């Protein structure tokens, strides 16, 4: 089955709009209704990994504890490094403190050199 970009985009947008104004209890009930048990497990682990990366936990420890591939952990790490990261904004909305030093420390040597003007 091929991905239908327009179908995906319009439906994700519609759900995001509905979720943004819904009661948290309703959102939780909806998510449990929407996802299978294994999908809920996967989504919950991805959220947990983003929180742990933001708190500076080593990627290999996260992968081992959550049973996730390093590829998924790396993807989460890359998303957190983005200037206007949706992950960072959502973590902030959830009340998760993101130490600025952790995000800066994880920047690549090239990014650090560019920031310093080298």
Image (tube, rainbow, N blue to C red):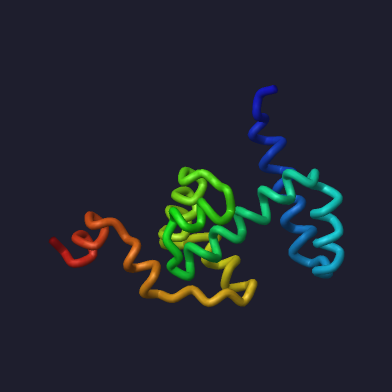
The number of numbered discs placed on residues in the rendered structure image is 0
Relative to the observer, which residue lies in front, 54 or 92? Answer: 54
Q: Is residue 34 left or right of residue 72?
A: right
Which residue is at 42% across, 61% downward? 58
Q: Position of residue 95 (x, y in %)?
A: 61, 77
* Residue 71 higher or lower than 19, as above or below: above
Relative to the observer, which residue lies in front, 97 or 83? Answer: 97
* Residue 116 higher or lower than 36, as above or below: below
Q: Is residue 36 left or right of residue 84?
A: right
* Residue 91 higher or lower than 62, as above or below: below
Which residue is at 47% across, 62% downward? 84
Give the position of the N terminus as an image quadrant: top right
Residue sticking out furthest to the left: 118
Q: Position of residue 41 (x, y in %)?
A: 71, 50
Give the position of the C terminus as an image quadrant: bottom left
Which residue is at 86% across, 59% downward? 29
Quadrant for residue 25, please give it. Answer: bottom right
Q: Position of residue 45 (x, y in %)?
A: 63, 54
Quadrant for residue 49, please give it. Answer: bottom right
Residue sticking out furthest to the top: 1
Quadrant for residue 3, please give it. Answer: top right
Relative to the observer, which residue lies in front, 101 or 20? Answer: 101
């Amino acid at each position: 089955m091929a991905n239908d970009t327009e179908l995906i985009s319009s439906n994700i947008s519609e759900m995001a709009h509905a979720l943004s104004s819904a009661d948290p209890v309703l959102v939780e009930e909806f998510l449990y209704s929407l996802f299978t048990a294994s999908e809920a497990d996967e989504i919950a682990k991805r959220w947990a990994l983003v929180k742990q990366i933001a708190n500076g936990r080593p990627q290999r420890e996260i992968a081992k504890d959550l049973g996730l591939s390093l590829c998924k952990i790396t993807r989460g790490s890359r998303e957190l490094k983005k200037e206007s990261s949706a992950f960072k904004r959502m973590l902030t909305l959830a009340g998760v403190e993101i130490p600025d030093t952790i995000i800066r420390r994880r920047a690549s040597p090239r990014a650090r050199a560019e920031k310093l003007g080298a």
